Image (cartoon, grey):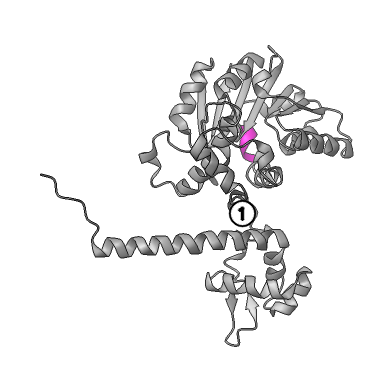
Amino acid sequence: MCNAHTVDVDTGEQFAQVMLSALNGGSLAVMISIGHQTGLFEALAEVQHATSHELAARAGLNERYVREWLGALVCARVVEVDATSTQYSLPPAHRPFLTKQGGSDNMAGFTQYVAMFGRVEQGILNCFRRGGGLDYDAFERFHDIMAEDSGQSVLTSLFDHILPLADGLVDRLQAGIDVLDLGCGRGLALLEMAERYPRSRFTGYDLCEAPIAEATEAARQKALSNVRFEQLDAEKLALADSFDFIATFDAIHDQARPDVVLRNIHTALRPNGCYLMQDIDASSHVRDNIEHPLGTFLYTISTMHCMTVSLARGGLGLGTMWGRQQALKMLHAAGFSRITEHVLPHDQQNRYYVLNK
């Protein structure tokens, strides 16, 4: 007869600490998101120390809210306060992870996802009970957050690290080729490439109307005649032998039918064309992701956004953590046989697949 499993005191006490950390960590994420969006971290980094009144004035905010925000950040050991509890400072060691000076090290922007998830919690609860999903329209500020995410993770590495992963691609872009960014959002990567490589022709497709309108306006303001944007469901991409280079940045796992989209990409490539896919570097097996530094966060993003927007459209619900094994299986099924994989030294969270037709 099997003995009933019991939790010993030490394990119970340790798990209580896990729960306390979860409550404090979740709260801290919301406070960091507010600090990021209001410019409080930037303002605090500009001075050696400041009172709540001085900081509020510098940031153009209400002092009472700033003072309470500072209390949360002090308790989290993010901000320091002097013995009088009136002078606040942001330690220099913290600044790269909370302000623009940190570049790709700045993690403050990612906390906006946590705040966004809180707004859709009740809708996701209904999905747990009834199935289905929430469409993109349910996610307030999604395109703002994704544009910021892309600007930090893709744009900062695009020319020096990402494009050179494909042999000869940079030379071809300089000479002039046809390029497609599928799931382009606001088209930040395409706009940068269109400026850098004026002889090439760039097309961006995205499912959502709003980011396409913003991308089109940005191209107009930059007077770029070699780039265009169009609203299009990637499943309906019906072009054969039309592009020399296709890229998807963190987009395939969101698709309703990623299998169809990958086949469409293969068809749309010209002979000897190149496809570059950026996606999350993870395993398709949960157990292998236990030590993933962002495992809990990424499965949460999947539950609260990536999986649900796919299921909302009757899709496969692949999810953020579809993983390398599933990715390779689907890429092979789409017709790709020559695949190389890369993880950039400064970006351990993403995997880049370079595929040739």
Percent x, y for residue 132? 55, 32
Percent x, y for residue 138? 66, 41
Residue 269 visible? no
Quick check: 151 above or below 12? above
Crowd tier of the residue under label 1, counting other residues whose Cα lies within 10 Å: few below 14, some 14–19, many 20 or above: some
In which quarter of the view is residue 279 placed?
top right
Main SS, magenta region, reads: helix
For disc 1, the marked residue is 115
Percent x, y for residue 102? 63, 57
Q: Quadrant of the C terminus?
A: top right
Q: Seen from this angle, which residue lies furthest left? A: 1
- Which of 136 and 213 lies nearest the eye of the viewer? 136
Residue 136 lies within the magenta run: no
Whether residue 46 sits left or right of residue 290 in the image: it is right
Secondary element under disc 1, as helix, strand or loop, is: helix
Q: Quadrant of the N terminus?
A: top left
Which amino acid type corresponds to the residue marked 1 in the rendered image?
Answer: Ala
Percent x, y for residue 239? 70, 14
Quick check: 333 above or below 16? above
In which quarter of the view is residue 95 placed?
bottom right
User: Over which residues does the magenta segment extend?
Assistant: 160-164
Which residue lies at the image location 51% right of the left edge and 44% below the top edge? 298
